[in-house]
């Protein structure tokens, strides 16, 4: 009897110790450190970029001990997209948990926002050429692949033609500053763009661009790079392209049709691909290429909110306007084009 009572007392003691221990541990581990950290990001747009950078740095420092997944938000990110009630829960839902070690050196973009336009409406005829693959055709190539592929020798013929005819490659960044602020452009400006971010852009196009002293803009499908797909660029290659003076733009996360989509979807594709490039290569992209050229007014609104400066379409032409920076025209370069055809399309579209 006594032995039973003793055992019962010990058991009760053990149970209450577990309960007390549990109770004292729960509040400590559930202190909302992470929430305190992220909630310090002011949902209102900061008037001073540096203030916002400091706020984000402070928030990141507060997050170092947080168990909660941390949000990496670039300082120029507009936290008011779709209203605070839409945007912040969206970010939290899609936040990727960041290992503690990586939170010590968070990516902080210090690049400026678009300098204020001077209000003058400007138009310019600037050809923006659209390339995809620079490679020999695989034996099983279908018509689509055929149309999108330019063999390296043929691409070099294009570059040789552009060089000997006095063209100067510029960036979309330069074009926008010209349209919005009148900053001068070189004689016969032209922009070379590559959609999709294929690996051959680095292996084949890049050395030829360097050989002729040209630069280009590469639009990346960021999920394909994050997944390490062998047909696409790696982040290391993207960094090398950028270090050599090339421009990096976004082409969405996984190349969907962006028409008729809700805000969450568009933010994920548009802001998500921007942040993927910031995280992967330390570059803030300012230009977007619509996947398959498909977009609507909502797409443009979200691009503007995410602080893109402009976007390229597949609308054929060379007429660029300060009034429509998110609808820049391009010339599709077909796989069958040699230097003669390139010369012909440039003369066809650019009015003397
Ligand atoms: Zn594409």
Image (spheres, helix red, strand yellow):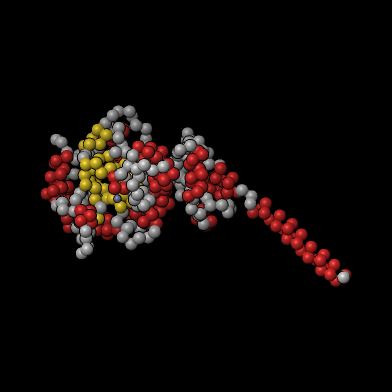
Look at 15% across and 36% down and name the residue there.
351
Q: Residue at x 27, y 50 (%)?
A: 194
Q: Classify the position of the N terminus by image quarter.
A: bottom right
Tell which residue pokes out farthest to the top in this image: 120
Left or right of 298 on screen, residue 169 = left
Q: Quadrant of residue 316?
A: top left
In the rendered view, does 68 fall on the left or right side of 201?
A: right
Extreme residue toward the front, this view: 1
Left or right: where 72 falls relative to 13: left
- Residue 227 visible at all: yes
Quadrant position of residue 265: top left
Place of residue 323 in the rendered image (x, y in percent of width and height, measured from the top left): 30, 32
Look at the image and tell me in which quarter the C terminus lies.
top left
User: 3 or 17: nearer the eye?
Assistant: 3
Q: Is residue 244 visible?
A: no
Residue 244 place in picture, x, y as percent? 31, 52
Using the image, determine if residue 170 lies above or below residue 96: above
Taking the spot 20% from the left edge, 64% from the top edge, the residue there is 139
Q: In the figure, 75 relative to 232: above or below? A: above
| Location of residue 254 in the rendering, given as x and y in whole percent from the top left corner | 36, 52
Number of on-image labels: 0
| Residue in view at x 20 percent, y 53 percent | 147
- Foreground: 177 or 344? 344
Q: Nearer the viewer, residue 111 or 73?
A: 73
The foreground one among 303 and 346 is: 303
Residue 72 position within the rendered picture, expressed as x and y whole percent measured from the top left: 48, 48
Q: Residue furthest right?
A: 2
């Amino acid at each position: 009897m006594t032995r039973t009572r003793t055992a019962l007392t010990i058991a009760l003691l053990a149970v209450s110790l577990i309960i007390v221990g549990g109770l004292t541990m729960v509040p400590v581990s559930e202190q909302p450190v992470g929430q305190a950290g992220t909630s310090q990001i002011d949902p209102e747009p900061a008037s001073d970029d540096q203030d916002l950078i400091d706020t984000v740095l402070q928030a990141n420092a507060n997050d170092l001990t947080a168990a909660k997944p941390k949000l990496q938000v670039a300082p120029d990110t507009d936290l008011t997209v779709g209203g605070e009630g839409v945007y912040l829960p969206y970010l939290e839902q899609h936040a990727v948990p960041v290992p503690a070690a990586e939170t010590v050196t968070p990516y902080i973009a210090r690049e400026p926002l678009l300098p204020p336009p001077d209000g003058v409406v400007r138009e310019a005829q600037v050809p923006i050429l659209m390339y995809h693959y620079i490679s020999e055709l695989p034996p099983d190539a279908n018509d689509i692949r055929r149309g999108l592929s330019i063999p390296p020798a043929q691409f070099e013929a294009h570059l040789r033609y552009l060089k000997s005819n006095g063209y100067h490659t510029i960036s979309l960044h330069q074009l926008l500053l010209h349209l919005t602020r009148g900053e001068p452009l070189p004689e016969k400006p032209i922009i070379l763009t590559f959609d999709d971010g294929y690996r051959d852009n680095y292996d084949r196009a890049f050395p030829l661009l360097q050989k002729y002293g040209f630069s280009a803009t590469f639009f990346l499908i960021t999920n394909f790079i994050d997944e390490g797909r062998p047909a696409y660029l790696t982040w290391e290659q993207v960094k090398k392209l950028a270090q050599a003076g090339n421009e990096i733009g976004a082409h969405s996360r996984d190349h969907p049709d962006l028409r008729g989509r809700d805000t969450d979807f568009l933010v994920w594709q548009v802001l998500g691909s921007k942040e993927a490039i910031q995280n992967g290569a330390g570059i803030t992209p300012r230009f977007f290429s619509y996947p398959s050229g498909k977009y609507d007014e909502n797409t443009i609104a979200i691009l503007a909110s995410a602080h893109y400066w402009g976007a390229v379409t597949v609308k054929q032409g060379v007429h660029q306007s300060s009034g429509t920076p998110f609808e820049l025209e391009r010339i599709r370069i077909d796989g069958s084009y040699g230097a003669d055809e390139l010369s012909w399309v440039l003369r066809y579209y650019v009015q003397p």
